[in-house]
Amino acid sequence: MNTMTLWHISLWEFAALAAAALLVGFSKTAVSGANTVSLAIFAAVLPARASTGVLLPILIVGDVLAVLTYRRHAHWPTLWKLFPAVAAGVIVGTVFLMWADDQVVRTSIGAILLLMAGVTIWRRRKAEAEEEPDSLATRTGRVKARSYGVLGGFTTMVANAGGPVMSMYLLSAGFRKLGFLGTSAFFFLIVNVSKVPFSVGLGLIDGNSLLLDAALAAFVVPGAFIGKWAVNRINQRLFEQLVIAATVVGGAQLLLR
């Protein structure tokens, strides 16, 4: 597959990608799930499949900055519970990419994101109305972790869109703002780094795409600092509403393209 190079895009296209890279930094340190907008911008400027290979290293830069910022707030028991299911989802996503075209990928991911947002809103309202017995809650928690883990692995491999899925899981699990950001930071750093060999094998990452990444990576850093400044000024309820809204917007964009 021919990946995109720095000299194949116009100045305006580069400006759009730079703005998307800045938003990646912001989403990693403030409103996780907002980078679905970045995904849509990359897919609009570049060929949809090739855009996933260009975006992945940008996401990893944002993940490193997020880990440095929120490393003390990660909840490792949750991470260990998710990783096996996520690994299965990544493998399924890799197989899916071998035959799916761009339209199938966009439609599938958009539908999953909107479904996850709807399920999360429903579960939160149900939890406010009634309390499950401990044994049922434990079984439900295991099933939920596996379901979200597989979907998260699948969506992050296919379109770098695992952020909204895992955001929905962490919100439904009752994570507060800093715990949410710290846990998701380590989760996506580990998952995104593990995706690199698969993306290289599929021809989505090569020297040309990495040159474009090198030019865009500098824009992630100011976005991360803006996010760190903003998150201290967002209360918990608004934070949750922004995460859900970003998920809905990202899902709708993918379905309507």
Image (tube, rainbow, N blue to C red):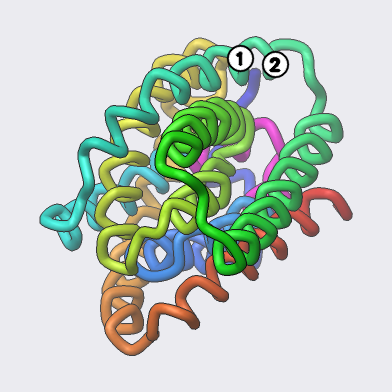
Residue position for label 2:
96
Asked which quadrant contains residue 227, the reply is bottom left
**Residue 76 vertical position relative to residue 92 in the rendered view, above or below:** below
Give the SS element for disc 1. Answer: helix
Q: Nearer the viewer, residue 167 or 37?
A: 167
**Residue 256 vertical position relative to residue 104 in the rendered view, above or below:** below
The reply to whether the magenta stretch includes residue 11 is no
Residue occupying image coordinates x 84% and y 49%: 255
In-image side of 10 versus 175 (left or right): right
Q: Which of the numbered marks, if any, corresponds to residue 92?
A: 1
Crowding at label 1, few (<14), some or many (≥20) Cα neighbours within 10 Å? some
Can residue 242 be seen in this snapshot? yes
Residue most extreme to the front? 133
Q: Amino acid at mark 2?
A: Phe
Q: Nearer the viewer, residue 121 or 245?
A: 121
Please say if the residues under marks 1 and 2 sit with CB atoms less than 8 Å apart.
yes
Residue 178, horizontal then vertical, whole percent: 26, 66
Q: Amino acid at mark 1?
A: Val
Give the SS element for disc 2. Answer: helix
In-image side of 85 versus 204 (left or right): left
Residue occupying image coordinates x 81% and y 24%: 101
Asked which quadrant contains residue 96, the reply is top right
Q: Nearer the viewer, residue 130 or 247?
A: 130
- Region of the chain picked out in magenta, as a range: 42-55
Q: Main secondary structure of the magenta part?
A: helix
Residue most extreme to the left? 72
The reply to whether the magenta stretch includes residue 44 is yes
